[in-house]
Amino acid sequence: MYAITIPEPGGPEALVWAEVPDPVPGEGEVLVEVVASAVNRADLLQRQGFYDPPPGSSPYPGLECSGRIAGLGPGVSGWAVGDEVCALLAGGGYAEKAVVPVGQLLPVPEGVDLATAAALPEVACTVWSNIFMIAHLRPGETLLVHGGASGIGTMAIQLAKAVGARVAVTAGGPEKLARCAELGADVLIDYREQDFVEELAKATDGAGADVILDIVGAKYLERNVKALAVNGRLVVIGLQGGVKGELNLGALLAKRAAVMATTLRARPADEKAAIVAAVREHVWPLIGAGTVRPVVDRTLPLDDAAEGHRALESGTHVGKVLLVAPKG
């Protein structure tokens, strides 16, 4: 088969479409013939040499894919060759074939075509696990999403609105904010022109956000704590603004607030399986009903993954960038 390889870390040009050995499914795994994958920030970091795949996982980038089951490993039941699926991966989505632990498989949701389904596993699992399973967002609460126009942001807006929460977002510029509003965002903050702490205080009569989903990290840490409501929960899932920040524990104590940080890729298989099962139970029906939908900015050939990385790095996208595998 062919896959996107990274012979040497570097810029987008470091991604090389090359022939590699076919993967073989082991115990409790299935082989998927890949139709599409999607670009995630973790893929950019892996390309640059900053984020190695977990031990034992595929060396190729790609944290999600969609396709058809082409083979079953020992001990697999409930799935059949030919089933159309999408999947959460620790790596290997940028390839013509991928091996997936059976607990990380999802059926393609009703009303979504097979290629577009590749836009769903990573964002659905990230958003559901962090906002609902960890931060326990409840109806009537306020959620602040940093990067509202990102793949994660566009999913977070829709899921939070679906459960009856109020949603505030930060994004860069009026066009991105308009797209967030179309998805249901109630409070629109241009981080280039406005201070999100001040704007959120105005919008909530000084109460702040009950839950904050943050992709920035250190740069926003102090201001995120200021923006939290009493009993608020800050969940950090990205470090685009650095890894070391100063935390005022007094401010945290005064608000009886919590700061949590998580990653999805390195979680053990049983934890990923539990998240995938929760997504299938809670998120898939909303997608099937049309209440929540995948947001795709553009679709590119998988063998031109470099262009997909440039698109994400440009910061001009809204939602996901898909990579479609060549037809054999």
Image (cartoon, grey):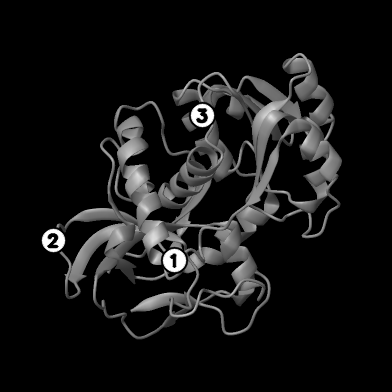
Residue drawn where x is 32% and y is 67% of the image: 100
Q: Secondary structure at mark 2?
A: loop
Q: Which residue is mark 2?
A: 80
Q: Which residue is mark 1?
A: 268
Q: Which residue is mark 3?
A: 160
If the image is split into quadrants, where does the N terminus sit?
bottom left
Q: Secondary structure at mark 3?
A: helix
Quarter assignment of residue 273 = bottom left
**Amino acid beneath label 3:** Ala
Is the residue under label 1 in contact with that under label 2 (CB below 8 Å)? no
**Residue 175 in sight:** no
Left or right of 51? Residue 138 is: left
Q: Position of residue 10 (x, y in %)?
A: 68, 76
233 or 99: which is nearer to us?
233
Q: Earlier in the sequence, mark 2 or mark 1?
A: 2
Q: Secondary structure at mark 1?
A: loop
Quarter assignment of residue 131 = top right
Quarter assignment of residue 167 = top right
Label 2 neighbour load within 10 Å: few <14, some 14-19, many 20+: some
Residue drawn where x is 31% and y is 80% of the image: 23
- Count numbered badges in the picture: 3
**Residue 10 in sight:** yes
Label 1 neighbour load within 10 Å: few <14, some 14-19, many 20+: few
In this rendering, is residue 113 above or below 41? above
Name, please, the residue furthest toward the top: 205
Label 3 neighbour load within 10 Å: few <14, some 14-19, many 20+: many
